[in-house]
Amino acid sequence: MIQPLERSLIVKSSPQSNDLWDGFKSPPYIGPFGSCKELQESNEDEVLISDPAGTGKSRACLQKIHDLAQRWPGSRYLIIRKTRTSLSESALQTFEDWVLGAGHPLILSGPERRNRVKYTYPNGSEIYAGGMDKPGRIMSTEFDLIFCQEAIELDEGDWEALTTRLRNNVLPFQQIMADTNPSFPRHWLKIRCDNGTTNLLESRHEDNPVLYDHDKNEWTKLGKVYLMRLDRLTGARKLRLRDGKWVQAEGVIYEGWDTTIHLIDSFKIPDHWRKFRCVDFGYVNPFVCGWFALDEDDRMYLYRYIYMTKRTVRVHAEKIEELSRDDMTLDPRIVCDHDAEDQATLVENGLETILADKRVSVGIDAVIERLKIQGDGRPRLFVLRDSLVETDQSLVEVKKPYRVEDEFDSYIWKEKSRKEEPLKEDDHGMDMVRYAVMAVDKPEKEPEFQVQQLAVNI
């Protein structure tokens, strides 16, 4: 059995031992506690920390990297997610705000966060930032330790490719570590843990000193509010984000949805592909507008979408027009929900509309068919990563779905025994997708709608 990393190799609080920054003091790190402490002391080849939402796992991983970078001159690290775009406002923000601190020399030098390639320490250590959607530089570099944030987004091929880059050999161990919220129990990452290939650490909310006061042995004010929010969740989302369990949603409708198959990297949509838009109205609940493209084999790609609460249809209409302005091959009609007032607002703002075919059971069956793997080894429905126009932070804060892809594996039947009616909760992205699929696959039904065959300009 591998022994825990000696405490002398990782300092508990970097400011007290920091002689690299001419007296600059990083934010104090209270902790680590529980599984976060185990993570910081581990030297296993592969380690995953899985937990409910908000246990401080990312901070623990990033603090470990920073402390090691200072202690081991010339060491090299990688912070990575599935896409580089998603990294800037997640791991890198945590790293700069909570580990380094405002005004840190590493932040003041070099480009802004979204364009930053690496952080270079005075002792020669380097921390790279990257995404598996743009693997060029990172896959040609050797590292001592790799941190995968939200590893649930990766596929196993990504993970195995990253392990081949662990050969810088400055640290006395080489490691790939990751954090994630739990997903369904047969996810490849959970299977690696179950068979012993990856060491699984399961943290708790008590591990996060922001939520739990270890001196007083009680929840902080923020902790009480945060847990109250999680307690309001339902179904599989509550079991995963509140209790940290790897569970499958009972009665899930789209059992064929697989993020490793249907969620794909973004690419430039060819000009000659047929394109159209589809809307599900909302204000308190999300307003969802999706841009879809169809390739030569009639595969559908959701390549852009709005998913936002508390904005009027007029404001959304302006944004839709702005995002569609330069796309001359986009069908002018928008397939939309049947709210007459909201539809009229779109029309008043210059957007042509057509009513969606809202038949539920037929539409669900049509989506299920498109999710199935066909004879060519590919399904007929895809969602492009990073196609969300803007993140609704109010949804993120209450742990509600804030992306269309978040809804697929929590969209369930209202009565599991009958399987006739879906539960009307967190389903606005699913309604929008269903309307879009029906618009393409059921043109013979009312209302008639068929995406125009557009001429190819060569």
Image (spheres, grey):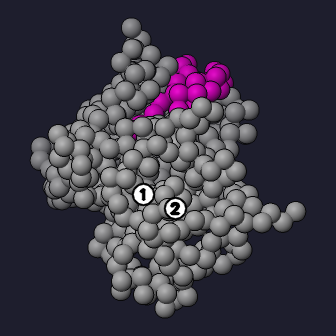
Q: How far across and how far down the image is residue 105, in percent?
A: 59, 56
Left or right of 12 in this view: 147: right
112 and 68: which one is in front? 112
Q: How far across and how far down the image is residue 240, in percent?
A: 27, 40
> Which residue type carries mark 1?
Arg
Which disc number belongs to residue 37?
none
318 and 197: which one is in front? 318
Residue 400 seen anywhere in this rendered image of the structure: yes
- Crowdedness near tag 2: few (<14), some (14–19) or many (≥20) residues, C-alpha within 10 Å: some
Quadrant of the rendered structure where residue 398 is?
Answer: bottom left
Helix, strand or loop for disc 1: helix
Q: How far across and how far down the image is residue 145, in percent?
A: 56, 30
**Is residue 328 positioned above or below 217 on the image?**
below
**Rendered residue at 47%/84% (across/down):** 346
**Rendered residue at 62%/72% (across/down):** 331
Q: How far across and how far down the image is residue 35, in percent?
A: 30, 31
- Residue at the disc numbered 1: 434
The Cα–Cα distance between marks 1 and 2, rounded to whole angstroms, is 14 Å
- Quarter of the image where the C terminus is located: bottom right
Which disc number belongs to residue 443?
2
Residue 62 seen anywhere in this rendered image of the structure: no
